[in-house]
Image: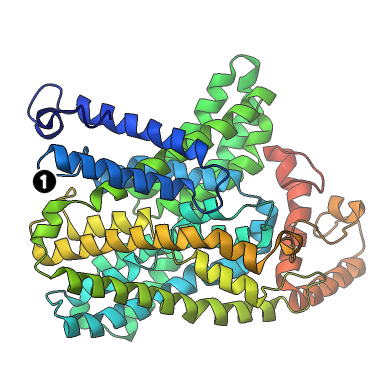
Amino acid sequence: MLLMMMSSEYVMKLGEGHAHVVPVTVFVAVLCLCLVIGHFLQENRWVNESITAILIGCLAGTIILFISKGKSSHILRFDEEVFFIYLLPPIIFNAGFQVKKKQFFHNFFTIMLFGVVGVFISTTIISAGSMWLFPKFGFVGLTTRDYLGIGTIFSSTDTVCTLQVLHQDETPLLYSLVFGEGVVNDATSVVLFNTIQKLDVNRLHGRQAVRILLDFLYLFSTSTALGVSAGLLTAYVLKGLYFGRHCTVREIALMVLMAYLSYMLAELLNLSGILTVFFCGIFMSHYAWHNTTESSKITTRHVFATMSFIAETFIFLYVGMDALDIEKWKLSKLRVWTLLVICTILIFLILLGRAAFVFPLSFLSNYANRNASRSSTITFKHQVIILWAGLMRGAVSIALAFKEFTHSGVTWDPVNATVVTTTVIVVLFSTIVFGFLTKPLVSCLLPPHDANIGDLSREPTISKEDMRLPLLSFEESAATNVLRAKDSLSMLLERPVHTIHHYWRRFDDAYMRPLFGGPRNNNSS
């Protein structure tokens, strides 16, 4: 009713004095409406916050379209720079800050397989498939770089929606894999997308493929190192200066600003801000959080989660409104039937590209963990759920499409308008349809009594004495150290993931925690 009361003059005229205040006010009111409706749907297993925001966005867009007499469905105009600078950092930082690190790093090898290798496989299949099928249905005018860009746009999974479908406590193994893949997937997609924009498509050869791989490895390692450094620096400052004895607000402000600073430095240095702020969140949670007062520990978790939630809701609300953007629909020269065929092709290619790496890479992961002392096998049911949960597309796909095919959210090119409209439709369909069906699918394949199969929350037994010892002791004889090194090498070859995690925990307790903060025991999450 609030939107019906807004006259078309106030919504559409951007030259008046209150032109920017009124749209923002209405948008905030709609955000509040999302919170209220989301509260009533909290217990509904079919609907999550993302779907609620999208549906309310569609409804708001319809009302605005009616008020403006078919001229526009927007309150605000989307700007991809706003997304990358203001909306994405709190979402990714909160994901790193709240994640259960024990499970994440136990699955690190599998997560990297899905999040890095999987993106390359999916991008190849979607790019090649669209390049072959689009012209057959009358959609022409795209360049080779455009097709490669489309491949990366639709290879980015929706971390936000997936996290709202799965839960850490109910399905810890699945949550760890899908969540970790989602973050690494987003980072890989953005890095690969930016690399493609600099690519000379007229001279594609083996050397350029190697160069892309080397550039990615450089960006991944340097971005991670920057995030780790920011997290450790924050922890060291908080531990050494103990801000909380005077004012708890300062220590919270320092954590927020250092996290944002790490993201902006990464973007300034042409690195991956997503990876940087994600690992910054992990290391702040692992070290810096323990150096704050009890009240700040509670406040930080709620503040970061709130900022992330608002940003997520904002994005999906806008996606719902943009689906009814009459300007882009008019610009597209394709018939509605042809446009729907293009969307169907993309959804099929997304499904094909996902299946092409989930099953083979799961087999490879199971083979690498074949000698593990406990069950961490990705069963076929797990693989089906991972495939399905990763079919959803969302905020990053929208932002990359706007970045490539529009200028500040506006385009006058029919081909570009078609790509953006298609992206919005695919995001809407995948989020609503796959989002609706994911919870019932999880309940069907993994009933509550089977949900903790493959639970990684129980660690292998490690003696306290081993945890206190460094990797090699200078107080022991050389022969003892040699024997220990041989045993360690044998463990590494037989159980690489478990062994690396085992020795990292010993190193962490012996050296890192005393310097940067945190409890020295077996129970850190």
Task: Judge by depth and name the residue closer to the eye, 428 or 268.
Answer: 428
Residue at 59% across / 31% down in the picture? 237
- Estimate how packed mark 1 is, as few (under 14), some (14 to 19) or many (20 or more) residues with alpha carbons within 10 Å: some
The N terminus is located in which quarter? top left
Residue 316 in view of the camera? no
The picture places residue 255, in percent across and down from the top left corner, at 53, 33
Residue at 21% across / 82% down in the picture? 203
The picture places residue 300, in percent across and down from the top left corner, at 57, 31
The picture places residue 350, in percent across and down from the top left corner, at 39, 73
Task: Judge by depth and name the residue closer to the eye, 21 or 62.
Answer: 62
Identify the amino acid type marked 1: Gly
Residue at 34% across / 54% down in the picture? 270
Rendered image quadrant of residue 204: bottom left
Q: Report whether 446 appears left or right of 13.
A: right
Residue 21 in view of the camera? yes
Asked if residue 497 is positioned above or below residue 207 in the image, the reply reads above
